[in-house]
Amino acid sequence: MIDKVPIEVIGYINSCFSEKFGTPRQSGLAPSAEARLKLVEPFNRREMFRGLEEFSHVWIQFLFHQVRTEGWKTTVRPPRLGGNERKGIWATRSPHRPNFMGLSAVQLKHIDFNNGVELVLAGVDLLDGTPVVDIKPYLPSSDSLDEASEGWAGRAFEKLEVEFLPAAVQFCSVYENETGVPLQQLITEILREDPRPPAQRQKKETFGMRLYDVNVRWQVRAATCRVSSCEKVG
Ligand code: SAM
């Protein structure tokens, strides 16, 4: 029996998420979160993409490279359950799994052949630098199952209202004009899912995350999240 298989990295993700905190907990939760998947040789031959542009979404199979040194776990506490319950690793989408393999269904916006080959993706939950090992078209007829049950992940979860102070709105508007990134929309999609770890949800502190080259700061009171500042890094 085979117990080890060689796997080759076919490309790397270039995304707006440079740190785990704030990265969406699942693909599709932040539709405005874009990334580029840059293919490497010999997996970037043009014929390998023939027909792919006909699909609106793709599966991206990747390695959770930033948790490998932490090792894998038999059980984890999913943030969705408030950190209070343990579930078996096979019952979760946690990164801390043997083989550190992840799977995300994302929108395929465009294939860019101008500088090698890059897939322009949206709705990602992937850190910058993520190594990718496979791409497959998403097939609604077989991948979307009407009769599927969502298990513990289907339990109700209160989303946050997201407000911006006027200076933060102004910053986002200028940033969008300069870069084309819909920053206010992206921040709203991320913060309404409440990225705070469960253990920190009682604290009345200021939280921060980095998106592209922008530091975003916010506070949460009850079920409202207020973005107090956005600033260019450095
Ligand atoms: N959709 C994928 C899946 O189901 O396999 C990923 C789900 S996982 C819960 C998403 C989280 O993985 C993100 O919030 C981020 O914290 C983490 N993550 C994303 N890319 C990573 C990487 N390359 N290394 C380690 N952790 C990563």
Image (cartoon, rainbow, N blue to C red):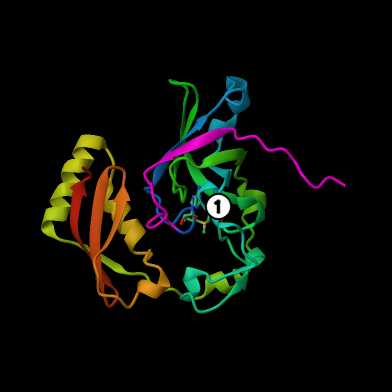
**Residue 197 relative to residue 172: left or right:** right
Is 13 one of the magenta-colored residues? yes
Query: Looking at the picture, how far across and down is residue 119, in whole percent?
Result: 49, 33
Q: How many marks?
A: 1
Residue 112 placement (x, y as % from top left): 45, 26
Which range is magenta? 1-24
Q: Is residue 164 above or below residue 149?
A: above
Whether residue 205 sits left or right of residue 66 in the image: it is left
Q: Which residue corresponds to the image point at 31% horizontal and 43% vertical from the top-left?
A: 212
Q: Which residue is mark 1?
A: 69
Viewer-closest of 211 and 183: 211
Res 124 seen here: yes
For the C terminus, the quadrant is: top left
Residue occupying image coordinates x 43% and y 42%: 128
* Vertical order, 215 against 36 (above or below): below
Q: Which of 111/17 is in front? A: 17
For image coordinates 50% across by 75% down, the residue present is: 81
Relative image position of residue 221 (x, y in whole percent): 24, 75
Q: Is residue 227 left or right of residue 189?
A: left
